[in-house]
Amino acid sequence: MNQSKLEVVKQEMVRLNVNILGISKLKWTRMGDFNSDEHYIYYCGQESLRRNGIAIIVNKRLQNPYLHSQNKEMHCQK
């Protein structure tokens, strides 16, 4: 998902009042998280194949301290 697609998804989440969204078949690699406007994005993808990744987009209003802690454990199947 490139940056412009992410912006469209976030706009649709706001328009439809969706606070948590899961995305599958993502082509992002590695694992991580980042802030984007009023959302946190958590993602995990395969290192070499660039397919079958997942992401969760969470509205900051619902942010759970366990999701954004330094000790979080996110597991990806390789």
Image (cartoon, rainbow, N blue to C red):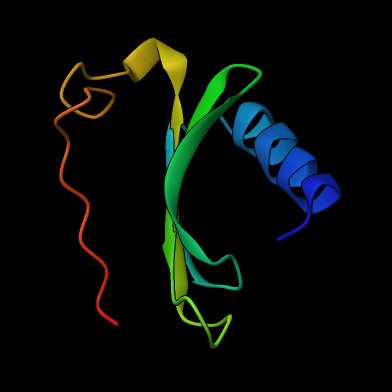
Figure quadrant of residue 15: top right
When asked about the image quadrant of residue 55, the answer is bottom left
Q: Residue furthest right?
A: 4
Residue 61 location (% of width, % of height) = 40, 11
For the point 20% across and 61% down, the residue is: 75
18 or 39: nearer the viewer: 39
Instruction: Please provide percent x and percent y for residue 8.
Output: 78, 44
Q: Is residue 52 above or below residue 15?
A: below
* Frontmost residue, 47 versus 26: 47
Lateral position of residue 64 relative to residue 13, left or right: left
Q: Residue at x 32, y 18 (%)?
A: 63
Kindly tell me whether residue 42 is visible in this rendering.
Answer: no
Furthest toward the top, the residue is: 61
- At 85% across and 47% down in the image, what residue appears? 4
Quarter that holds the N terminus: bottom right
Q: Residue furthest front?
A: 48
Q: Quadrant of residue 7?
A: top right
Q: Is residue 45 visible?
A: yes
Name the residue located 66 percent from the left edge and 18 percent from the top edge: 37
**Lateral position of residue 32 relative to residue 3, left or right:** left
Q: Position of residue 22 (x, y in %)?
A: 42, 54
The C terminus lies in quadrant: bottom left
Query: As rendered, which of 77 and 21 lies closer to the eye?
Result: 77
Relative placement, left or right, of 65 versus 17 is left
